[in-house]
Image (cartoon, grey):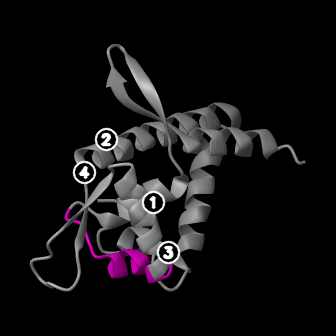
Amino acid sequence: MGPCCPLFISTRHALSLVVGPRVGDARVVIAARPIHGFALQALGSGGTTITDLGRRLGVSKQAAAKTVIGLEHLEYVERRRNPHDRRAALIRRTSRGDELLALSAEVFEGLRERWICELGVDRVRGLESDLERISANVKGSKLGDLSGWLR
C-alpha cells in the first residue's frame, strides 16, 4: 500500500457514512453510498426520468432503476406523474434527499479542508484543476455541463 492509502480509506469512510437528521441535539448516522449522492445530484432540482438519470450517470436504464428503488426505500426520492410523458414517471428528491445532499456537501468540504492541511492549498487547487481538465475530455463534455447536474 502506498502513502495515499490512509487518505483514500478515510475519504471512502467519510463518503459511506453521512451524518443524518437531528434527533434532539445529536445527528443520526445514515449508511449512504457514494452513488446515492451522485444520483441525487444528477436528478437536479426539478427531477428527471429513470432513462435520463441513466444517461446523466453514464449507466444503463436498469442500473438507474435499481438505484432509484434503493433511494425510494430510504425515502430520498419519490415518483410523481410526469406532466410531459404519461408513460414515464418523474423521479424527484424528497426533503430528506435534499438534506442528505446538503450534508454530503459538508462532508466533502471537510475532506477538502483536511487535504489542504495535509497538502497545502496550491497543491489541492492544482489537483482540482487537473481533474477538471481530465473530466472535460470524458465523452466530450464536463460533468457540470450536463443538464440538471449539480443543481
Residue type marked 1: Phe
Q: Secondary structure at mark 3?
A: helix
Q: Say which quarter of the image contains residue 87.
A: bottom left
Would you name the residue on which mark 2 appears? Answer: 99
Mark with earlier residue (2, 1): 1
Residue type marked 2: Glu
In this rendering, the answer to whether 47 lies above or below 72 is below
Query: Measured from the top left, where is residue 89 in percent x and y?
Result: 22, 75
Q: Nearer the viewer, mark 3 or mark 2?
A: 3
Q: Is residue 78 left or right of residue 66?
A: left
Outermost residue to the top: 25
- How far is the residue under mark 1 from the one under mark 3? 13 Å
Question: Residue 38, labelled with which disc?
Answer: 1
Mark with earlier residue (2, 4): 4
What residue appears at the point 43 percent right and 37 percent down from the top-left corner? Answer: 106
- How far is the residue under mark 2 from the one under mark 4? 9 Å
- How far is the residue under mark 4 from the one under mark 1? 15 Å
Question: Residue 63, labelled with which disc?
Answer: 3
Residue type marked 4: Thr
Would you name the residue on which mark 4 appears? Answer: 94
